[in-house]
Amino acid sequence: MGGGNGQKSRMARERNMEKAKGAKGSQLETNKKAMNIQAPKGVTLCLNKVILDISTGCRGIQAMEASNKKAVNRDAITEEVAAAFAESNVIPERYYRPDEVNAGIVVGYDDDEAYELPVVDMGRLLDPELAGAEIAKLGSACRDWGFFQLVSHGIDEQVVNEMKDSTARFFSLPLESKKTVAVRENGIEGFGHHYSRVSGKLDWAESVILFSVEMTSLTMRIVGFMAADLGVEQEALVRAFRDSRQNMLLHHYPPCRLPDKVIGITPHTDGLSLTVLLQVDDTPGLQIKKDGRWFPVRPRQGTFIINVANILEVLTNGAYRSVEHRVLIHARKSRTTVVMFHDAHIDGMVQPIQEVLKHNGAEARYRSIEKLEYMKGHFSCKVCMQTFMCTTSEVKCREHAEAKHPKTDVYQCFPQLKK
Ligand SMILES: O=C(O)CCC(=O)C(=O)O
Ligand SMILES: [Fe+2]
């Protein structure tokens, strides 16, 4: 970064910090009340995934045991895997997941001319002359892919770089240091703590604060353009996101010499409303499911990867799709990502937006459900823990059970369907 830019960034940063410390009624003050930032966790707890942190000197490992879905004690795994990986290519049995890695066809970058994850340009969205076409692009990305890459996003480069650097630094700490912020409640394995924007204990809390403020405003901007695409007033969608929670996960996927035998994150959809992902390095790994095939995302410098999550699918009455994705492990390079999940609700409910229904003259395709019920996790499959759109009719649950767990009774997956 040049000196001029550096100066500009610093000023922007100071402005942001002022904002961050700012008076009542400021964005931060509002967010502070509304957001429950869980930052930073080493790696997410979700699903029955296994993440092995075995790169340089075993920095910490999180795992859910495939057999019984119980969280595995991180220290125990650390010892075991450190021993197992020090000099051999043997993968402890519980991490051995070749079937999941090899399930489904993966589209190669060069297989399909038409394949490139849609790119949306914030600069164009903000330009009155170009906005119409770019909004249409944004809309079709959310309908067809559920994912897009955002370029020219306008987020302060220094804020992004500091977030990246702090994250990378954190994961390179010795395990002993990371243990001082280990999370051990509720079977969640990882690092971090419930975190207040003004009193975070981490010495890099400032980076997190600045980044999270930027991510909130970026999300609000994007959502405003989504409203335009959906043919409703901005406020109809924006209000669902206002004062909503924001969760952050930092992922570190270490390399593994046998990448087709272990998985980074098993296929899932995201449970909140809109996810914004920042790639810290250029290691590929994220794959998106489209028309039954896995499409790898080619990491691009200076972009965010944005995806529609479950609640946004409901809010838009299914116009936008919350799409399955997964992460594979690289043989030689580690991969680190910063993921911001943004929540939304309509007056405490998860339901299609009235204005969207009216605009399309459509019936609601999703049942209304209280946000609290939704968050209790009633709507994840109890067999594979995939978060799932069960707010729809039972049909989707049954389809899921039949496709994914044909040998299992649907009520085992979704006990709440039993009346
Ligand atoms: O790290 C990634 O690329 C994806 C992370 C993800 O899908 C998630 O945290 O839900
Ligand atoms: Fe995800």
Image (tube, rainbow, N blue to C red):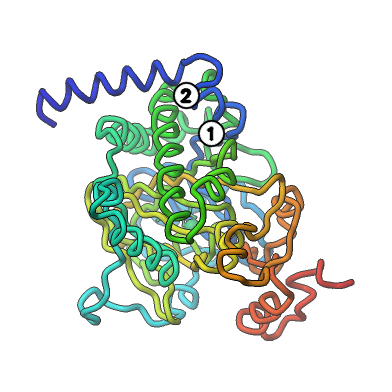
Q: From this view, report whether residue 148 is shown above or below residue 181.
A: below
Q: Is mark 1 in CB contact (under 8 Å) with mark 2?
A: yes
The residue under label 2 is which amino acid type?
A: Leu
Q: Which residue is mark 2?
A: 202
The residue under label 1 is which amino acid type?
A: Gly
Disc 1 secondary structure class: loop
Q: Nearer the viewer, residue 4 or 353?
A: 353
The quarter of the picture showing ligand 1: bottom left
Which of disc 2 and disc 1 is earlier in sequence? 1
Q: Nearer the viewer, residue 13 or 387?
A: 13
State the image quarter where residue 332 is shown.
Answer: bottom left
Q: Nearer the viewer, residue 368 or 335?
A: 368
Q: Which residue is mark 1?
A: 192
Report the quarter where the N terminus lies: top left
Q: Residue at x 35, y 37 (%)?
A: 172
Q: CA distance from mark 1 to mark 2?
A: 8 Å
Q: Residue at x 71, y 51 (%)?
A: 349
